[in-house]
Amino acid sequence: MKFFKFSIILTLSLLLNDCTTPYQPRGFLGGYSDSRIDSNTVRVSFYGNGHTSQEKVENSMLYRCAEVTLQDGYDYFTIASGGTTPSYSSYTTPGTYNQFTQYGYGTASTFGTYEPGETIITKRFESSVLIKMFNGIKPSNSPNTYDAHELIHYMKPQITSQNAGQ
């Protein structure tokens, strides 16, 4: 029975091994979402699944901020507030009871063994920020301010290569 449980866990882990969150609108595996606050303010979020690193979630969120900025006709954005938070969930696989019966000289005895289930804990990251978008040249001394054109230029190969593995 242990071999059976091991083979199921191994098969599931192989199937889910490369199921990191693709760069996409939010769906079953995670992704981005945006909410407009006013003409130049948007809340941008990226939700990862249990196989997506914090770095990938944060990079995808920044990339989405740049896309939204350019789509709305702006040149740069400032992160006004927000950050990345982990969330934890767990589930426990069912336990198993193996029963055996021995026969001998007109008698039978039954005994068994119980194998408890396993508790599996997953950690997911969500990055959500409030951005203000502006036109013109990005101020050089403004922290948390990004030129949307440059960010897209430098991060596009990384974002597209992550999706190619899906």
Image (tube, rainbow, N blue to C red):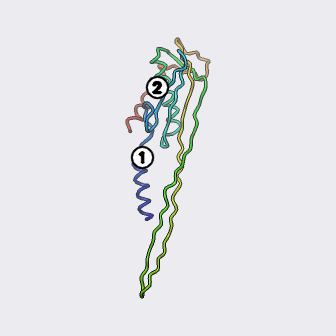
Q: Mark 2 sits on what residue?
A: 154
Most distant residue in the top direction: 136
Tell me the element at label 1. helix
Q: Mark 1 sits on what residue?
A: 16
Q: Is residue 108 above or below residue 148?
A: below
| Observer-nearest of 166 and 92 | 92
Find residue 20 and report its image quarter: top left
Left or right? Give the position of 130 relative to 33: right
Find residue 25 and report its image quarter: top left
Mark 1 vs mark 2, CA separation in Å = 29 Å
Contact between marks 1 and 2 (CB within 8 A): the answer is no
Coordinates of residue 68 in the picture (x, y in percent): 47, 21
Q: Residues within 10 Å of mark 1 (few under 14, many from 20)?
A: few
Task: For the N terminus, give its image quadrant.
Answer: bottom left
Residue at image position (54%, 49%) is 90
| Observer-nearest of 76 and 93 | 93
Left or right? Give the position of 82 relative to 22: right
| Observer-nearest of 48 and 104 | 104
Dot 1 amino acid type: Leu
Tell me the element at label 2. helix
Residue at image position (40%, 50%) is 14
Coordinates of residue 69 in the picture (x, y in percent): 49, 19
N-terminal of the pair, mark 1 or mark 2, is: 1
Q: Is residue 23 above or below residue 140?
A: below
Q: Is residue 92 above or below residue 110?
A: above
Q: Residues within 10 Å of mark 2 (few under 14, many from 20)?
A: few
